[in-house]
Image: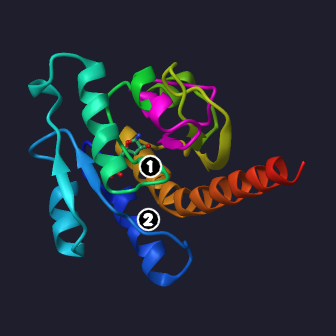
Amino acid sequence: MASGSGSNFEAIAAAIRSGELNASIELVIYNNPKAKVAERAARLGIPAQLMDHRTFDSREALDTAIAAQFKTHKVNWIIMAGWMRRVTQTLLSAFPRRILNIHPSLLPSFPGIHSVEQALNAGVKITGCSVHFVELIVDSGPIVMQAAVPILPDDSVESLQARIQMQEHIIFPRAIALAASQTASATANEISS
Ligand code: GRF
């Protein structure tokens, strides 16, 4: 699921192509008609579907439709790669502990939007990015993987954001693989006990 440029989506697709991540992307859902992710998906031959939140009566109605689409495509994991909408219990219940998000800070510091700017303004010397399981509270949920990014004295929001994104592209595919393998072994343990 993506709302914007889709550089993380493309990094995940590249990791799959190179064999680093054993997965397939069945469907990209985007909510903003102008989102560049749609062009990237078309270029890569991956189906993408616009689900414009403005055409739904409520967050729940949007999430019901999203869950139905993913079920139709037999999706196991939902990857929120720059999805800028709050999710509801409707989507969480349809895919329990199967939704991952990436956030441009070292959570639990600087949740929400403007995290890069907030880290810069706070004067912290290290920030980064986090991949975590999605829960109802925005940018909460168990952390799967993080990467640290030092803040340089002459950093702007743009320069810092660019270096954080480089790390996002590295850790997101790895975090997906890790979360999937941990979930698979937890399930195997449950079955055998
Ligand atoms: C990423 O920086 C991510 O941390 C945030 O949204 C941004 C999405 O970028 N949640 P892109 O669309 O993957 O380029």
Mark toward the start of the polypeptide (2 vs 1)? 2
Name the residue furthest bottom. Answer: 18
Camera-near label (2 vs 1) is: 1
- Tell me the residue that label 1 is attached to: 79
Q: Quadrant of residue 117?
A: top left
Q: Residue at x 22, y 63 (%)?
A: 47
Q: Residue at x 49, y 29 (%)?
A: 93
Q: Is residue 76 left or right of residue 191?
A: left
Q: Would the CB of label 1 be found within 8 Å of ligand 1?
A: no
Instruction: Name the spot of residue 70 as percent of width and height, x first.
Output: 34, 48
Q: Residue at x 39, y 48 (%)?
A: 81
Q: Are marks 2 and 1 in contact (CB under 8 Å)?
A: yes
Query: Label for residue 12?
Result: 2
| Placement of 58 over or under 45, stated as above or below | above
Q: Quadrant of residue 37?
A: bottom left
Instruction: Name the spot of residue 143 as percent of width and height, x first.
Output: 66, 39
**What is the span of residues highlighted in magenta in the rendered image?**
92-117
| Placement of 89 over or under 150, stated as above or below | above
| Numbered-mark total | 2
